[in-house]
Amino acid sequence: MARELFTFEEFNKDFWTYFRNKQKEIIKQMESEYEEEDDFMFSDDIVKKSNNGKLRKRLREI
């Protein structure tokens, strides 16, 4: 009988750790992109909404 390589709990923990790290990486990348676009003046609400939309789109691609 084959032995399990890892338990579900181990897999679940590793997956969410990877997911959170990837999310932080994407957020940092997006923040640096907005810092480069200093010509445009955005209100905080518009930036937050567009960040959320882009973040969701990038996370769906993963």
Image: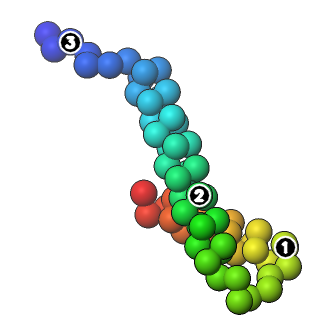
- Viewer-nearest of labels 2 and 3? 2
Q: Is mark 3 on a helix, strand or loop?
A: loop
- Name the residue that disc number 3 marks: 3
Residue 45, numbered label: 1
Q: Position of residue 37 (x, y in %)?
A: 65, 82
| Distance between mark 3 and mark 1 Cα atoms | 52 Å
Quarter of the image where one finds residue 51: bottom right
Residue 28, numbered label: 2
Which label's residue is closer to the chain start, 1 or 2?
Answer: 2
Task: Please tell me whether residue 38 is drawn above or below residue 44 in the rendered image.
Answer: below
Q: Position of residue 39 (x, y in %)?
A: 71, 89
- Is 7 or 25 nearer to us in this picture? 25
| Distance between mark 2 and mark 3 Cα atoms | 40 Å
Q: What element carries label 1?
A: helix
Q: What element carries label 2?
A: helix
Quarter of the image where one finds residue 31: bottom right
